[in-house]
Image: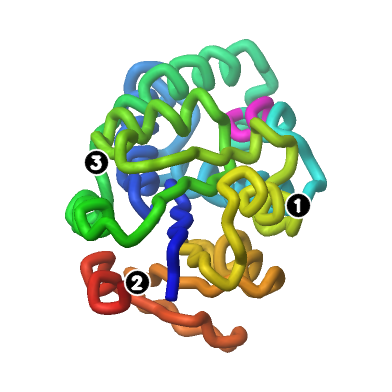
């Protein structure tokens, strides 16, 4: 039924939550941020809230990547009265030079990609939001770069999931048809909602088994290895 499988990267294959937390903890100590925050958890909870908000606004086309990157670390600092943008800039540089070299994948991500590639039935593609240089390195660090026939990133084309334009571009760039393609991702809005809007089947990767009242995805799994039962 399917010929073309499109994967999100962050928290679908590459364990962004784990790797980001680990990197932020290292940098929290490196920059002695306990001078300003009650604890790492205090800092990180503020960072997560502001970062999620910025990426949501980016996905909706309300801000660009430059805005996201200028503010993602400045927002937590402002909450404790720090207005020194140079500190946020230094933190950002160190973050992006450290994060993409983390190697941790989601459980069974490598096994699933190996299964799909070895089956000989599918073309595998990446369809992801984010900074191109960073996303490429994440795939290399995780040892999964070579599984993909093409990598399509929002920064390269100036439009992000869930907007239709990036899905249309992906179909054109890979010579694919929606009816023969499948989107796999963990974001309801960006991956599942975006694919549903263009008539593309989806697998919602929901490892935390969060409840939802939205239109049902084509498929839903809590473990990536369960996708082998579908494909």
Residue at image location 29% in from the left, 71% down from the top = 227
Q: Residue furthest right?
A: 62
Q: If the image is split into quadrants, where does the C terminus sit?
A: bottom left
**Residue carrying label 3:** 104
Q: Is residue 127 visible?
A: yes
Q: Residue at x 52, y 81 (%)?
A: 217
Give the left or right position of residue 2, taking residue 216 as reference: left
Crowd class of label 1 (few under 14; some 14 to 19; many from 20; radius 10 Å): some
Where residue 17 appears, as percent x and y from the top left, is: 37, 48
Image quadrant in which the N terminus is located:
bottom left
Q: Residue at x 39, y 68 (%)?
A: 205
Report how far apart the C-alphas of labels 1 and 3 lie in the structure.
Answer: 31 Å
Q: Position of residue 102 (x, y in %)?
A: 29, 31
Disc 2, SS: loop
| Residue 208 badge | 2
**Mark 2 surroundings: few (<14), some (14-19) or many (≥20) residues within 10 A:** few
* 134 versus 30 height, above or below: below
| Of the pair 37 and 74, the residue shown nearer to us | 74
Badge 3 vs badge 2, beta-carbon distance below 8 Å:
no
Label 1, label 2: how many angstroms apart (C-alpha)?
Answer: 30 Å
Residue shown at the point (65%, 33%) measured from the top left: 155
The magenta-colored residue range is 69-73
Choose the circle earlier in sequence order: 1 or 3: 3
In this figure, which residue is indicated by the disc labeled 1? 165
**For residue 121, what is the image quadrant?**
bottom left
Circle nearer the viewer, 3 or 2: 3
Is 188 colored magenta in this rendering?
A: no
Residue 153 drawn above or below residue 27:
below
* Most foreground residue, 42 or 219: 219
Main SS class of the magenta portion in the image: helix
Expressed as whole percent of the image width and height from the top left, the position of residue 186 reads 45, 63
């Amino acid at each position: 039924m399917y010929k073309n499988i499109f994967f999100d990267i962050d928290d679908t294959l590459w364990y962004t939550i784990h790797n980001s937390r680990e990197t932020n903890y290292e940098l929290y100590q490196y920059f002695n941020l306990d001078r300003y925050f009650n604890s790492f958890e205090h800092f990180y909870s503020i960072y997560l809230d502001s970062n999620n908000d910025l990426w949501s606004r980016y996905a909706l086309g309300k801000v660009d990547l430059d805005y996201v990157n200028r503010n993602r670390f400045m927002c937590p600092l402002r909450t404790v009265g720090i207005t020194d943008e140079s500190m946020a800039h230094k933190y950002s540089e160190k973050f992006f030079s450290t994060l993409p070299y983390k190697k941790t994948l989601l459980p069974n991500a490598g096994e699933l990609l190996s299964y799909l590639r070895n089956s000989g039935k599918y073309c595998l593609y990446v369809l992801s939001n984010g900074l191109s240089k960073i996303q490429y390195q994440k795939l290399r660090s995780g040892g999964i770069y070579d599984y993909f026939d093409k990598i399509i990133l929002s920064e390269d084309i100036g439009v992000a999931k869930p907007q239709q334009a990036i899905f249309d571009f992906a179909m054109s760039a890979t010579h694919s048809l929606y009816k023969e393609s499948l989107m796999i991702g963990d974001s309801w809005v960006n991956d599942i909602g975006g694919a549903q809007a263009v008539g593309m089947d989806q697998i919602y990767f929901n490892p935390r088994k969060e409840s939802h009242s939205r239109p049902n995805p084509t498929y839903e799994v809590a473990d990536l290895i369960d996708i082998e039962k579908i494909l």
